[in-house]
Image (cartoon, rainbow, N blue to C red):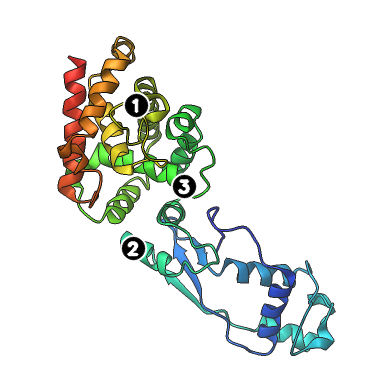
């Protein structure tokens, strides 16, 4: 059993940990610990990390009990200072565990993790996904999310809730698997992550190069206004990235015939003028404003933008 890297660091106070130890002593029921069986058959703690770490720390004399209610006479004592009878009470307690086995359907695993997500600051879907599918592929997304050109284009300079990571994931998934896309988006992204569980070094490098070359062209064409809705003068009319527009721009550019040399020759003023006409057209706006995860709208906006780019490239 181990604590995976995505889990929160140890954050319990000594009072919280002491009350847990006191509960063990008085035979008070302890909440179930949930484990996830990894592909290598090890078990990762997905719920109960704070409890497990508190017990381990107390058993190794790393803190003294404090603010006890039932056994105030134990106040200030470490484990080795306890009466042997009380030590046995603690050591002999059974911690109930429920294991999600490795062959469980990925979406069921995700749903279980999501239902267990009851912390003070609840994890969002990408944070859960980052934990459930941790490995080489998620490490690549972490690496790309830190790229300066991405920070510049996305304007997500202090992205602490993995918004940028989810956008990069969306790009890869739609670029490779658009023909398989169907609602809900959450399930589509989860399935794509699952397919990358045993990704090769060659594929990792290919995806990295794809992203960097695509974001480079996007940066040259749009600067920092790339994924924002613009008015007809090219001025952003929103303060947040439009994720649906992001899909169209990134996938469209990645599939286009545009190269860095071709982009360098594009009249930027003329290009942005035509781009603003496109995204403000009734047909295109319908694909990025409401119900944007519908299969038909995802396909439509990517295809519309792709056709636009192909005309520019000629």
**How far separated are the C-alphas under marks 2 and 3?**
27 Å
Kindly identify the residue that appears in the image at 48 percent across and 71 percent down: 34
Which one is nearer the viewer's eye here, 138 or 124? 124
Which one is nearer the viewer's eye here, 237 or 311? 237
Counting from the top left corner in percent of width and height, residue 211 is at: 37, 30
Answer with left or right where residue 244 lies relative to residue 56.
Answer: left
Q: Is residue 220 above or below residue 129?
A: above
Q: Label 3 belongs to which residue?
A: 162
> Which tag, 2 or 3, sits closer to the chain's start?
2
Q: Secondary structure at mark 2?
A: loop
Q: Secondary structure at mark 3?
A: loop
Locate the N terminus and report the quarter of the image it occupies.
Answer: bottom right
Marks 2/3 in contact by CB < 8 Å: the verdict is no
The label on residue 108 is: none
Report how many numbered discs are placed on residues in the image.
3
Counting from the top left corner in percent of width and height, residue 191 is at: 29, 52
Kindly identify the residue that appears in the image at 37 percent across and 42 percent down: 167
**How far separated are the C-alphas under marks 1 and 3?**
20 Å
Category of crowding for the residue at label 2, using alpha-carbon neighbours closer than 10 angstroms: few (below 14), some (14–19), many (at least 20): few
**How far separated are the C-alphas under marks 2 and 1?**
36 Å
> Which tag, 1 or 3, sits closer to the chain's start?
3
Locate the C terminus and report the quarter of the image it occupies.
Answer: top left
The label on residue 214 is: 1
Category of crowding for the residue at label 3, using alpha-carbon neighbours closer than 10 angstroms: few (below 14), some (14–19), many (at least 20): some
> Which tag, 2 or 1, sits closer to the chain's start?
2
Counting from the top left corner in percent of width and height, residue 101 is at: 39, 66
User: Which quarter of the picture shows residue 258?
Assistant: top left
Q: Label 2 belongs to which residue?
A: 103
Which one is nearer the viewer's eye here, 176 or 97? 176
Answer with left or right where residue 170 lies relative to residue 88.
Answer: left
Q: Secondary structure at mark 1?
A: helix
Answer with left or right where residue 218 lies relative to residue 287.
Answer: right
């Amino acid at each position: 059993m181990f604590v995976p890297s995505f889990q929160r660091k140890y954050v319990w106070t000594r009072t919280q940990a002491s009350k847990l130890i006191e509960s063990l002593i008085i035979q008070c029921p302890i909440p179930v610990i949930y484990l996830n069986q990894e592909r290598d058959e090890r078990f990762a703690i997905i719920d109960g990390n704070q409890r497990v770490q508190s017990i381990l720390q107390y058993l190794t004399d790393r803190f003294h009990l404090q603010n006890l209610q039932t056994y105030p006479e134990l106040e200030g004592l470490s484990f080795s200072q306890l009466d042997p009878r009380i030590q046995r009470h603690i050591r002999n307690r059974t911690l109930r565990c429920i294991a999600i086995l490795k062959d469980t359907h990925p979406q069921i695993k995700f749903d279980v993790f999501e239902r267990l997500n009851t912390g003070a600051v609840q994890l969002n879907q990408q944070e859960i996904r980052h934990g459930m599918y941790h490995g080489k592929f998620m490490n690549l997304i972490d690496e790309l999310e830190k790229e300066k050109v991405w920070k510049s284009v996305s304007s997500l300079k202090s992205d602490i809730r993995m918004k940028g990571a989810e956008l990069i994931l969306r790009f890869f998934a739609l670029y490779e698997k658009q023909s398989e896309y169907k609602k809900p988006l959450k399930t589509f992204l989860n399935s794509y992550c699952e397919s990358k569980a045993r990704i090769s070094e060659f594929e990792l490098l290919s995806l990295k190069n794809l992203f960097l070359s695509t974001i480079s062209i996007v940066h040259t064409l749009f600067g920092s206004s790339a994924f924002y809705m613009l008015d007809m003068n090219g001025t952003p009319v929103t303060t947040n990235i439009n994720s649906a527009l992001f899909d169209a721009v990134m996938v469209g550019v990645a599939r286009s015939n545009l190269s860095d040399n071709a982009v360098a020759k594009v009249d930027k003023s003329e290009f942005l003028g035509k781009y603003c006409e496109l995204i403000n057209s009734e047909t295109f706006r319908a694909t990025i404003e409401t119900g944007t995860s519908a299969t038909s709208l995802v396909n439509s906006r990517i295809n519309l933008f792709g056709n636009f780019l192909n005309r520019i490239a000629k």
